[in-house]
Amino acid sequence: MSHTHAQPVQTIDQRTLRDAFGAFPSGVVAVAASVKGQLTGIAASSFTSVSIEPALVSFSISTTSSTWPLLREADRLGISVLADHHDAVCRQLAGPREERFGGLPFRVTENGAVLLDEAVATYDCSIHDEVVAGDHVIVLLEVHGVGAGGGEHPLVFHRSAFAKLHRDDLDPSRLDGRINGAEVDRGDDATADARPDAEDAA
Ligand SMILES: Cc1cc2nc3c(=O)[nH]c(=O)nc-3n(C[C@H](O)[C@H](O)[C@H](O)COP(=O)(O)O)c2cc1C
């Protein structure tokens, strides 16, 4: 295998590493809760699905975050998958703490999870585990409930900018039942290593 363009790890400068990370597209979620009566949250592009049984998702938060020490005190955390018209909402949720929820349409569940209106999907979560990983903490969340906020298409974050999905020139057939090339019996118990996102990919 040729690695002509690869750089040895020790010589990678932070800019190059950030650019490489940015080549991988993701969605963006709001991670938010009402904690001791205070609306608290951030925008996070590090969200990912982890496990079907038990239902787990994760995101990573900077160890320097001033919000996480408060947010982690919440009984329940709301995860809202931002829709493609939520670009300004995303900037707001990543901005000054006292202005993050001003004018935003959202609801607070009885357990204190904050869920955005018009999200593409919502998750009602509690913290399952936290794993320190370098300058971030990987937060594993147990999913207690999922819903849809009414949004149809997700906001995409790629190379430090927002984008929308367009896939009209791609094979539209779903990957259901062909995960890792093997037939999957959708009636069986799901296993933790069956990638839920692959199952749902269209
Ligand atoms: C598109 C986008 C994605 C982000 N993703 C993350 C993330 O995954 N993890 C993280 O710690 N911060 C992320 N941030 C930054 C946070 O939203 C927020 O600005 C930061 O946590 C603010 O600092 P505080 O935690 O001290 O309030 C992201 C910001 C933007 C605009």
Image (cartoon, rainbow, N blue to C red):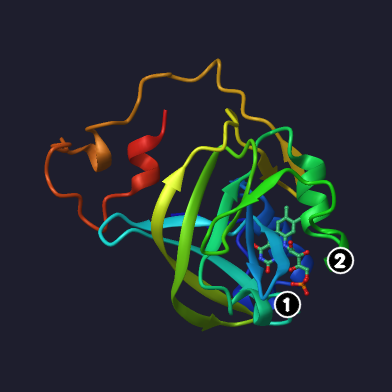
Q: Earlier in the sequence, mark 2 or mark 1?
A: 1
Q: Looking at the rendering, which quadrant does residue 16 occupy? A: bottom right
> Dot 1 surroundings within 10 Å: few (below 14), some, or many (20 or more)?
few
The residue positioned 68% from the left and 31% from the top of the image is: 164
Disc 2 residue lies near ligand 1 with CB under 8 A: no
Q: Secondary structure at mark 1?
A: loop
Name the quarter where the N terminus is drawn.
bottom left
Name the quarter where the C terminus is drawn.
top left
Q: Which residue is mark 1?
A: 65
Q: Secondary structure at mark 2?
A: helix
The residue positioned 66% from the left and 38% from the top of the image is: 155
Instruction: Please name whichever residue, 90 or 160, is drawn nearer the observer in this view of the structure.
Output: 90
The answer to whether any part of residue 96 appears in the image is no
Above or below residue 59? Residue 89 is above
The residue positioned 50% from the left and 37% from the top of the image is: 148
Residue 34 in the image, given as x and y percentages of width and height? 65, 66
Kind of residue sitting beneath label 1:
Ser
Residue 196 left/right relative to 116: left
Disc 1 residue lies near ligand 1 with CB under 8 A: yes
The answer to whether any part of residue 92 appears in the image is yes
Residue 161 in the image, given as x and y percentages of width and height? 78, 44
Q: Which residue is mark 2?
A: 98
Kind of residue sitting beneath label 2:
Glu
Above or below residue 105? Residue 35 is below
